[in-house]
Amino acid sequence: MESTRNRLIKLLNQEDNYISGQQLSDHLNISRTAVWKHMKELEKDGYEVEAVQRKGYRIIASPDKTSENTIHWGLSTSWIGHQLHHYEEVDSTQDIVHQLAKQGKPHGTVVVADEQIKGKGRMSRPWHSPKGKGIWMSILLRPELSPVQAPQITLLAATVLAKVITSQSQLIPFIKWPNDILINHKKVSGILTEMQAEHDQIQYVAIGIGINLNQSAEEIPVDIRHKASSLRAESKEEWNITSTIQEILKQFESTYDQYAAEGFNYVKEIWETYGYKIGEKVTISTMRRTWEATLVGIEPDGALIARDSEGKREKLYSAEIQWGEGGYDAK
Ligand code: BTN
């Protein structure tokens, strides 16, 4: 059940103009005194509420901190993030989203944390998630897909992040297959997809998104500084966590809806325009041989397609690519 506070924020959010105490009390089914008390609570949260006699209430500024309220305020989505859980500190937002999924929470539920103590990366690696320096977020999806199609959702998420970075800055993001976001050859963001499936049907997918947002170059751990960075270090500008989360959720929803309507080709085309080294030569090593290949694109099962010097195409599933030049050469 959504809290009265969240419903209040949504109502105030729908109105460009003032909304009267009576209208709020009718919509929320609470007394006008209760409306007034909620307004006072919002002010304590850091909102600036303007109250004008005979006109009503209007929010004129929201606080500079991330909370369920501040994310909801200004979030213009239809289904994503309506159920939103914000924590100051968690082990991992993935753990929380799995619990929520098992409790039956709906498609589009979002978990955000200021800090993760045991942030998880792909291949059981730790994910450094310092307090207030990045976006540590998990999205619960309940797609009507078979498990083999799950990689499509991860590829989709990567295109969303690339689009948001492009629209919010002058930076040029690339997606290093399958789903790392690179700026100037350094990783600034990663995606971890975990899935629960039964009888050839996905029960739910937990999409974990980590973005290094506001670490200075010196705050990136020394051992990975040659291959990792943050949006701030690359753009030389501070990023607003709340509005970037809102932008990601908005873009995620529209991309997902379009993918649901048009199918994987929609994602594939966008992914390939951002694809790192697509159309370029890389060295690929397998157990059997090492060969030079040109990267061509991606397949619906998430595989990367490479073409050898004789024009023969091969599908790649595991990380056996030497990406070559630049700071980022990790698998
Ligand atoms: C990667 O290895 O590139 C994936 C990193 C994914 C990190 C995010 S942060 C939010 C979510 N919670 C986690 O514990 N991991 C993911």
Image: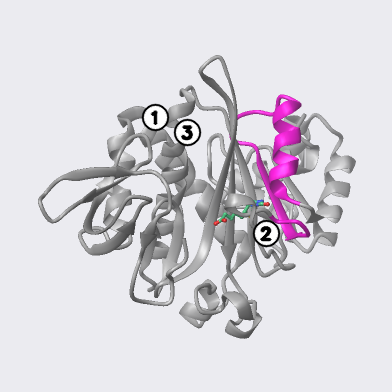
Q: Which residue lies furthest to the left in this view?
A: 310
Residue 175 placement: quadrant:
bottom left
Label 3 neighbour load within 10 Å: few <14, some 14-19, many 20+: many
Label 1 neighbour load within 10 Å: few <14, some 14-19, many 20+: few
Residue corresponding to mark 3:
150
The Cα–Cα distance between marks 3 and 2, rounded to whole angstroms, is: 23 Å
Residue corresponding to mark 1:
260
Residue corresponding to mark 2:
126
SS at mark 3?
A: helix
Q: Where is residue 57 in the image (x, y as percent from the top left)?
A: 71, 51
- Residue 63's tag is none
The answer to which of marks 2 and 1 sits earlier in the sequence is 2
The answer to which of marks 3 and 1 sits earlier in the sequence is 3
SS at mark 2?
A: loop
Task: Specify the amino acid type for callout 2.
Answer: Pro
Q: Give the range drawn in magenta.
A: 92-119
Residue 113 belongs to magenta span: yes
Q: Looking at the figure, which quarter contains the N terminus? A: top right
The Cα–Cα distance between marks 2 and 1, rounded to whole angstroms, is: 32 Å
Residue 86 belongs to magenta span: no
Q: Residue at x 20, y 59 (%)?
A: 279
Q: Mark 2 or mark 1: which is in front?
A: 2
SS at mark 1?
A: helix
Task: Specify the amino acid type for callout 1.
Answer: Ala
Label 2 neighbour load within 10 Å: few <14, some 14-19, many 20+: few
Q: Position of residue 235 (x, y in %)?
A: 47, 78
Label 3 within 8 A of ligand 1 by Cβ = no
